[in-house]
Image: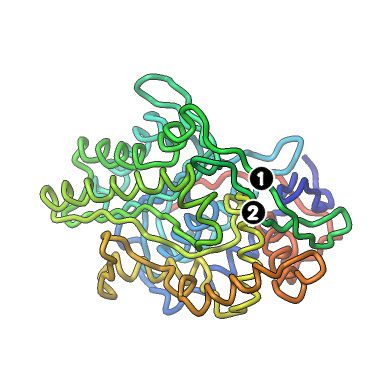
């Protein structure tokens, strides 16, 4: 594929192409936003980030590299450039690897199915051979539509559905001209084994399998710590999220954390936690009915006081490494969402939600910010990038060089 002008073409919130230059600039901005970066080279703690190319997993990778000086492995599942450009995560990974190399961080990125035992074997071999057989941290941040069980070959599919009865909610959409509209959408309830299927994909089963796989190879260091990234969210979105099929999966993830924490504490003096992150515009969250409207209204209330994913993951790394005290709730979860769920904030968002219509939405929500954030997920609407200039989409997957 030769150089060409890459224009944003979308179906709703899903873009068909990604811009390499825009994705690279966004990764640069995320790295620069990390406060007090360390200056160490290749001798930081060894970390594995599963789901390292997007959303909070990307933030965990960049914050870990810049703030802590981690070395190790990032695992993700992205499409290479072909007839269309590569996925945004492909380009973000290339950009992250470039910065890691510049800062002398020994970080290897693997592209493939994190649910498979083949990927677990590849990671285990790398830890044993490249990182002296010692893993200090594992961050688990996987959002996927399907998972194949390595033991049975069964394929499970996750769904976004309420439990018990249909749910109607307001949601934010943009028409063909880009104008925002508030519409109602009704989602049918979970049926058959929808809940079990979603739990099988998005619950804690694969996270626990990773820990067991690496423990069986004696690759977990004394004091090993692991965190799975989660979300609770507002009562406004609870029916479709925390009380829906995904919420059942998150509850399973949290139960898994308690089991793993007891096990790791006994065997290694280690720890397992879930980290409850706050709302953000991600490729996964834009698929959830009502989330677009909620996040736009939240931004309308808080403006720049919203804590970015990078800001939240810096806090997570500080707590995991002991730079700041571990702050757990009664369920043993790290809470990075307290600013979002502050009662005053939620009351203000709820008031705006109740009065939001297509006529009032631009007064109540920061729709321009939200629209730009969605485009930025794919490398568009990035200041400093000239989108009229041809770009090279054929960026290779990064190879380790340190």
In which quadrant will I find the N terminus?
top right
Q: Residue furthest front?
A: 165
Residue 109 shows in the view = no
- Position of 72 relative to 252 (above/below): below
Colour mapping used in the image: rainbow
Q: Secondary structure at mark 1?
A: strand
Q: Nearer the viewer, residue 212 or 221?
A: 212
Which residue is found at the position 55% from the left and 61% from the top?
Answer: 236
Q: Residues within 10 Å of mark 2 (few under 14, many from 20)?
A: some
Label located before the other in sequence (1 or 2): 2
Q: Nearer the viewer, residue 155 or 91?
A: 155
Question: Can you identify the residue that label 1 sits on?
Answer: 186
Q: Residue furthest right?
A: 177
Residue 113 shows in the view = yes
Which residue is found at the position 34% from the left and 32% from the top?
Answer: 121
The answer to whether residue 192 is left or right of residue 26 is left
Where residue 390 appears, as percent x and y from the top left, is 83, 54
Label drawn at residue 111? none
Question: Can you identify the residue that label 2 sits on?
Answer: 169
Where residue 70 appears, as percent x and y from the top left, is 36, 61
Q: Nearer the viewer, residue 104 or 280?
A: 280
Quote the CA–CA distance across marks 1 and 2: 7 Å
Which residue is found at the position 44% from the left and 41% from the top?
Answer: 202
């Amino acid at each position: 594929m030769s150089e060409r002008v890459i224009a944003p073409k979308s179906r709703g919130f899903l873009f068909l192409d990604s811009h390499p230059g825009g994705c690279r600039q966004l990764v640069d901005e995320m790295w620069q936003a990390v406060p007090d970066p360390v200056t160490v080279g290749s001798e930081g703690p060894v970390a594995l980030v599963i789901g390292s190319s997007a959303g909070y997993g990307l933030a965990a990778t960049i914050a870990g590299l810049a703030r802590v000086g981690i070395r190790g492995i990032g695992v993700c599942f992205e499409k290479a450039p072909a007839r269309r450009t590569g996925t945004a995560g492909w380009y973000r990974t290339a950009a992250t690897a470039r910065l890691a190399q510049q800062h002398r961080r020994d970080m290897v990125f693997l592209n493939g199915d994190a649910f498979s035992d083949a990927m677990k074997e590849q990671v285990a071999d790398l830890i044993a051979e490249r990182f002296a057989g010692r893993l200090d941290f594992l961050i688990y941040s996987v959002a996927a539509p399907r998972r194949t069980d390595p033991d049975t070959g069964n394929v499970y599919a996750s769904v976004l559905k309420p439990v018990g009865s249909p749910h109607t909610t307001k949601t934010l959409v943009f028409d063909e001209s880009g104008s925002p509209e508030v519409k109602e959408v009704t989602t049918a309830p979970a049926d058959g084994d929808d809940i079990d299927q979603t739990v099988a994909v998005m619950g804690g089963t694969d996270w626990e399998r990773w820990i067991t796989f690496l423990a069986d190879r004696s690759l977990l260091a004394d004091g090993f710590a692991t965190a799975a990234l989660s979300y609770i969210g507002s009562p406004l979105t609870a029916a479709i999220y925390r009380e829906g099929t995904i919420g059942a999966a998150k509850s399973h993830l949290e139960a898994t954390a308690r089991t793993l924490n007891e096990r790791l504490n006994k065997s290694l003096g280690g720890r397992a936690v879930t980290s409850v992150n706050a709302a953000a515009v991600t490729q996964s969250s834009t698929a959830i009915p009502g989330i677009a409207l909620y996040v736009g209204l939240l931004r309308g209330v808080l403006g720049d006081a919203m804590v970015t994913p990078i800001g939240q993951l810096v806090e997570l790394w500080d707590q995991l490494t002991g730079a700041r005290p571990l702050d757990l709730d009664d369920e043993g979860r790290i809470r990075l969402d307290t600013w979002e769920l502050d009662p005053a904030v939620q009351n203000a968002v709820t008031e705006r939600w109740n009065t939001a219509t297509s006529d009032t939405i631009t007064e109540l929500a920061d729709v321009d910010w939200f629209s730009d954030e969605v485009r930025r997920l794919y490398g568009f609407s990035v200041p400093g990038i000239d989108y009229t200039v041809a770009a090279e989409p054929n960026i290779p997957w990064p190879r380790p060089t340190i």
